[in-house]
Image (spheres, rainbow, N blue to C red):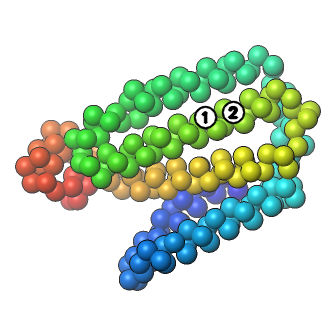
Amino acid sequence: MPQELPNLGALWNKEDLDVRKSGGGPTDLIKLQEQRTRQLEEMKQKLEEGSVFDGNELARQVHRFPKDSIADILASSRIAKQNIVEGKTFISDEEATALGVPFTHKCIELKMGIIDLIDSGATFVTVLLTSPEEFDIKNFSTEIAEVIWKAISVARNIDLLAAPARVISSKSVLALTVQNVMTGKRPTKR
């Protein structure tokens, strides 16, 4: 399942687009969202049954980490989040504003999603490292399902930003800013 998350994000975006293209309205999109929520519940059940991940194998792998890994994981998590917020590993909010409001909104949404995913992952791994022998995947099925949902949301935003990012990367910042200010056109349109 984890290797399928980026594809699932793109698939969900395509499904949403297909609904809008076929004349579907908010009600149809809500039905689609409800269907996805049911899929998440099914995944949670599969986690509890042990048919998605092998909980024992996961606990064995985590048990191999030294106990002092917790501090390293928390430090890495903090640094990664800080770098994202400060624009060191991702476009800064100021840079995104030069590219227009829709692009800025999606960039900020993606950044916050990545930060939330880092937080959730670090917390989950910390819990695993604290007491791997007591780990039972059934007790964490809700948390794992939520992390998967967050990962799909991040994948959706990455998919939505990929095409505009390719267009933007082919132009200079000055040209994009002038286009945005003078014409009001989205810089992602060719």
Towards the viewer: 27 or 158: 27
* Apparent side of residue 68 relative to residue 87 in the rendered image (left or right): right
Res. 60 in view: no
For the N terminus, which image quadrant?
A: bottom right
The image shows residue 170 at horizontal and vertical percentages of 25, 47
**Residue 119 tag number:** 1
Residue 50 placement: quadrant: bottom right
Q: Residues within 10 Å of mark 2 (few under 14, many from 20)?
A: some
Q: CA distance from mark 1 to mark 2?
A: 6 Å
Query: What residue do we see at 45% from left, 31% from top?
Result: 84
Q: Amino acid at mark 2?
A: Thr
For the C terminus, which image quadrant?
A: bottom left
Q: How many marks?
A: 2
Query: What residue do we see at 16% from left, 42% from top?
Result: 177
For the residues labelled 1 and 2, say whether their Cβ atoms are less than 8 Å apart: yes
The image shows residue 147 at horizontal and vertical percentages of 65, 47
Kind of element beneath mark 1: helix
Query: What residue do we see at 46% from left, 52% from top?
Result: 157
Please, which residue is most extreme toward the bottom here?
22
Q: Amino acid at mark 1?
A: Asp
**Residue 123 tag number:** 2
